[in-house]
Image: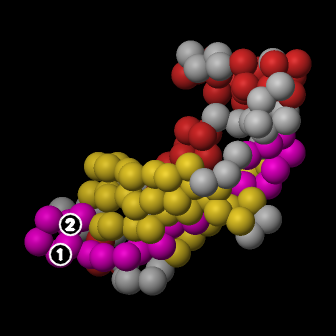
Amino acid sequence: MQGLYFDDLSEGQSAEITRVVGVGDIEAFAEVSGDTNPVHLDDAYARTTTFGGRIAHGMLSAAYISAVLGTKLPGPGAIYLSQTMRFRRPVKIGDPVTARATVKALDDKRGHVTLETVCQVNGKTVVDGEAVVMVPRRGA
């Protein structure tokens, strides 16, 4: 299965997914990543923090960005080269996270695409940054 080719892309093109963060998602991410910080897993502890309850791992939202890049824009065949991120707000259990990637620049010589990346909950940015991916050319 092949996603979009470099030649199919243009500045301003975008794609997104929305996922509702559940308790199971947070627990599975903790298991896979090894990040068992109690702010993610322990209700009693998390209530004593500035967040007032459990929050999702910031990198879980980052994984949703990866899902957009790997499945939609550019999609299968794209290779993640780099990602910058700023974590702006917490994501709580039950929040609908919309991850979006928008083509910002195309480096024709290298076949690299720079994308603005953002995750939002109810229209408020929770994570933003920039990704660079390598995208195959048609017939290469």
Residue at the spot x=32%, y=59% of the render?
A: 132
Residue at the spot x=83%, y=25% of the render?
A: 48
Residue type (three-letter) at the residue carrying disc 1? Asp
Residue at the spot x=79%, y=55% of the render?
A: 96
Residue type (three-letter) at the residue carrying disc 2? Gly
Residue at the spot x=55%, y=43% of the render?
A: 63
Q: Does residue 10 appear left or right of residue 85 in this picture?
A: left
Are discs 2 and 1 less than 8 Å apart at CB?
yes
In the depicted structure, whether residue 114 falls above or below residue 78: below
Q: Which of the pair 131/79 is nearer the observer?
A: 131
Residue 123 position within the rendered picture, expressed as x and y whole percent measured from the top left: 74, 69
Residue 56 position within the rendered picture, expressed as x and y whole percent measured from the top left: 71, 36
Residue ID for mark 2: 111
Residue 137 position within the rendered picture, expressed as x and y whole percent measured from the top left: 24, 67
Residue ID for mark 1: 108
Q: Which residues are magenta?
A: 91-112
Q: Does residue 116 appear left or right of residue 47 in this picture?
A: left
Q: Which of the pair 101/48 is nearer the observer?
A: 48
Q: Quadrant of residue 140?
A: bottom left
Q: Secondary structure at mark 2?
A: loop
